[in-house]
Image: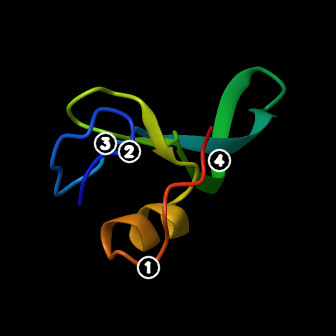
Amino acid sequence: MICPRCNREIKRLNTTISDITSYQFTLVRNKIPSYKKIDIKDQHSPFSCPECNRIIAANEKEAIDFLSGKEKFRWF
């Protein structure tokens, strides 16, 4: 694929994934803190060109479509 921003050939996109973990907080015997993990969610940053670092896709579906040639660049 050709990056629509810098016109360089690219075969991958960059993103950052952060895990957001939710915990339930309680006190054991009214004094000992206790954390129980209740949920983990992944959060992706937008997908960007590895050459110029400009955004190409907002989410994973758009990134797949771009890299597979199914969708043209739509960001302005």
Q: Are marks 4 and 2 in contact (CB under 8 Å)?
A: no
Marks 3 and 4: CB-CB under 8 Å?
no
Residue 31, given in percent of the width and then of the height, sits at 77, 20
Please tell me how crowded label 4 is: few (under 14), some (14-19), or many (20+) other residues with Cα within 10 Å: few
Q: Amino acid at mark 1?
A: Lys
**Left or right, residue 64 beside residue 59:** left
Q: Secondary structure at mark 4?
A: strand
Q: Which label belongs to residue 14?
A: 3
Give the CA distance from mark 4 to mark 2.
46 Å
Residue at figure coordinates x 69%, y 26% from the top left: 33
Q: As drawn, which residue projects farthest toward the top? A: 31
Tell me which amino acid carries mark 4: Lys
In this rendering, the answer to whether 62 lies above or below 75 is below
Name of the residue lying farthest toward the right = 30
57 relative to 10 in the view: left or right:
right
Of labels 4 and 1, earlier in sequence is: 4
> Which residue is labeled 2 in the image?
4
Q: Is 61 on the left or on the right of 35, as rendered?
A: left
Front label number (4 vs 1) = 1
Q: Quadrant of the C terminus?
A: top right
Separation (CA) of disc 3 from disc 4: 33 Å
Q: Position of residue 27 (x, y in %)?
A: 79, 31
Helix, strand or loop at mark 1:
loop
Residue 68 position in % (x across, y down)? 32, 76
Sequence-wise first label, 3 or 1: 3
Numbered badge on residue 70: 1
Left or right: 12 in relation to 58: left
Q: Nearer the viewer, residue 61 or 20?
A: 61
